[in-house]
Amino acid sequence: MQIGKLKALTPMVIVYVILLVIGLTVPGMWQPVVYFMFYVALGQAFNIFLGLTGYVDFGYVAFLGLGAYGMAIALQSFAHLGLIAIPIGIVLAVIMSVLLSMAVGAVALRLRGAYFAIATIGVNEGFRFLLVGTKLWGGSEGIVLSGFMRKAFGREIANYLSTFVSDLLLFLVAFLAALTTVVILNRKMGYALLALREDEDAARVMGINVTKYKIMAFITSAAFAGLIGAIAWTLKLTYVFPEDVFNIHYTVEAIVIVMLGGAGTLIGPMIGGLIYGILKYYLSVIFPGVQLLILAPLLIITIVAFPEGVAGYLIKRTRNSRLAEYLR
């Protein structure tokens, strides 16, 4: 891939650096910035599948949840190895999410549109009831890791991992998801995915193996979901409960972020994640208890005003200008 194609990452890098500087220099802003970045990373990861294929996966949170359990199992089992347990947990989180995505994708991706969405709704609920019913990995009591981490790493390092290192890793995951999107968009896979998003039947007639590319996008997106679950939940919160990590509202939030920012665009999930995260955070501070009542109409107004997403509007307005090569 030509280096020039990476220009599209420039606005993203600038925004990430600004957020890092704000978080590190403004007192009390680190955790709000990380809160915003969680939604940016979630949007970037989900956009690889929803944005590039047009398929809505309502079971997406299952991959985040399984990634969270992957890190929890690794920390519980390999805490005696010290900090090596963390990369083991990251690898295990990705493997578990990818294996689940392969199993789900092999069945659900044979369906289209609403049938695919309905088929994926039960994935996260099925996994939650499986863990609770079989009492697997602690069942409904989940896995609490604060004691393991303090014994293995020491109190100070354990606190440092959950309050700073996990947050920095979230920035890295958001960037890697965006970089992966750029690489996909500039390869044969990207053109194939965009063709099937516009008209799957026409793409199939043209000889594109749409099933292969859908599964590749599905697995890639799930792998990043596993990373987010391992880092933003387990490593940061130091506990995993099935009711929390398999909650479908995270999937709904991911869909809103991608549609708000601009599905299939590179910069859209970042814009959507920031708008959604900032509104949700500050409305809950200013109007506690009724924040969602205010947030919903604001999101509806934004989506009606920008039907192609905020990024889609910006890209259209800057077409044929020098700014266009930085917006995609």
Image: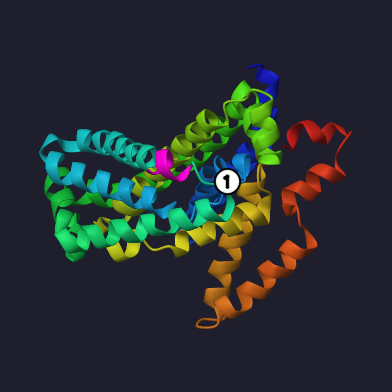
Q: Is residue 12 above or below residue 116?
A: above
Q: Is residue 118 above or below residue 108?
A: below
Residue lying farthest to the right in this orientation = 320
Left or right, 199 with reference to 184: right
Q: Nearer the viewer, residue 11 or 249?
A: 249
Q: Give the amino acid type for the residue marked by disc 1 in the picture.
A: Leu
Q: Nearer the viewer, residue 89 or 15?
A: 89
Q: Position of residue 30 (x, y in %)?
A: 47, 56
Main SS, magenta residues: helix
* Magenta segment boundaries in residue numbering: 104-109
Can residue 10 be seen here? The reply is no
- Crowd rating for badge 1 (residues with CA inside 10 Å; few <14, some 14–19, many 20+): many
The residue where tag 1 is placed is 50
Left or right, 196 with reference to 253: right
Q: Is residue 259 above or below residue 302?
A: above
Residue visible at 30% across and 33% down in the picture: 91
What is the secondary structure assignment of the residue under circle 1?
Answer: helix
Residue visible at 57% across and 44% down in the picture: 47
Q: Position of residue 308 (x, y in %)?
A: 75, 52
Question: Magenta stretch: residue 23 in it?
Answer: no
Left or right, 80 with reference to 58: left
